[in-house]
Image: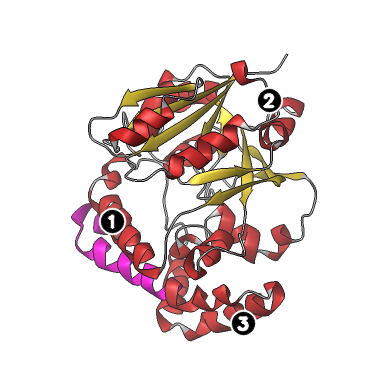
Amino acid sequence: MKPKISFVTPMKEKDFRVIKLLDSIKSQNYPKNKIEVIITDGGSNPDVLKKCKEYSFVKIYHNPKGFAEGAGMGKDQGIWKSTGEFVVIAESDIELIGNEWINNMLKPLEKDKEIFASVPRLYVNPADNFTNRYLSYVGVDPFAVQRSIEGQLELNQRLIKRKENYFIEILNKDKPYCMGSNGFMFRKSLIKKVGDYAQDVEFIARLAKADIVKFAVVNNARIWHKNVKGLYDFLKKRVKWTRNYTTIYISEKKDFNWITDKKEFVINVASNLLVFPNIPISIKKSVEYRDSSWLLHSPLMFLSTALNIYFSLTSKKMMKQILGI
């Protein structure tokens, strides 16, 4: 008997991007009575909400403060309202690729009860804009590539050679991956063990601390993340997210720590700011994939790092955490 799957989608949509997500869920080769989509809405276009209500598996709830992350906010609220055995965090700007996505993601979770989550891979659309194509390789925040699962899958040679339909990874308790979101599927029962879903990274860090460390990377389950419309959109979103992280979300952080090795962290930051150390990677990947979007690697590493430094310097809480005082 198939388990019930709950997609949790926090949104504040002006356009109709979420419809592509809902259509990709509807097209799944999976019983429709075993699928629900929980939309926690922070003030979307009424016409978008009206369209969403046409899908029988959609339930819409109001998210008063509009934030996706934070205890009691969009993701956390949606998870607690969900009724599925497994939860998928599905932002409104993603699309599932292929109609076997749910089945492929479920396979490792059903096979091994110790696996706490399945992580999909990002789909790189050749027709996508230059900036979004690059982000489809490394994830939404270039600054995080040293810790993010997307960045490490692309740049860590130990991981990049894994070509199975799925493979198992183990979280490092002292240095867990930044992951979650964008199609991340996990066992709902785990939310009770960690208390809430304050942030993607915080949820993962709390699981690692509780010795829940085994997860699957599913190579044959892809999501297309239509994150940005171009370079300007990238900068605008990075400014907003980084400002919110250092002022609002910093209060939610309890277990996740960006700086586990100060020397390594300083070297990475310096390397990003100098630009040229990342140029060989840009060139190598551009040739490997025959995709010139990789030429953005060095400048976007610089820009995202500079934004993190600027907003950290303006946040007393962030500086206390960085300086360890």
- Badge 2: how crowded within 10 Å, few (<14), some, or many (20+)? some
| Cα distance between the residues tagged 2 and 3 | 42 Å
Which image quarter holds the C terminus? bottom left
Q: Which residue corresponds to mark 2? A: 30
Q: Of discs 2 and 3, which sits in the foreground? A: 2
Under circle 2, the secondary element is: loop
What number is the disc on residue 39?
A: none
Type of amino acid under label 1: Lys
Type of amino acid under label 3: Ile
Under circle 1, the secondary element is: helix
- Residue appearing at x 58%, y 56% in the figure: 150
Q: Are marks 1 and 3 in contact (CB under 8 Å)?
A: no
Q: Which residues are magenta?
A: 301-320
- Badge 3: how crowded within 10 Å, few (<14), some, or many (20+)? some
Quick check: is 306 in the magenta stretch? yes
Compared across the picture, whether 159 is left or right of 63 comes to right
Which image quarter holds the N terminus? top right
| Cα distance between the residues tagged 2 and 1 | 37 Å
Q: Earlier in the sequence, mark 2 or mark 3?
A: 2
Q: Which residue corresponds to mark 1? A: 240
- Residue appearing at x 34%, y 68% in the figure: 232
Q: Earlier in the sequence, mark 1 or mark 3?
A: 1
**Horizontal and vertical percent for residue 119?**
62, 43
Q: Which residue corresponds to mark 3? A: 283
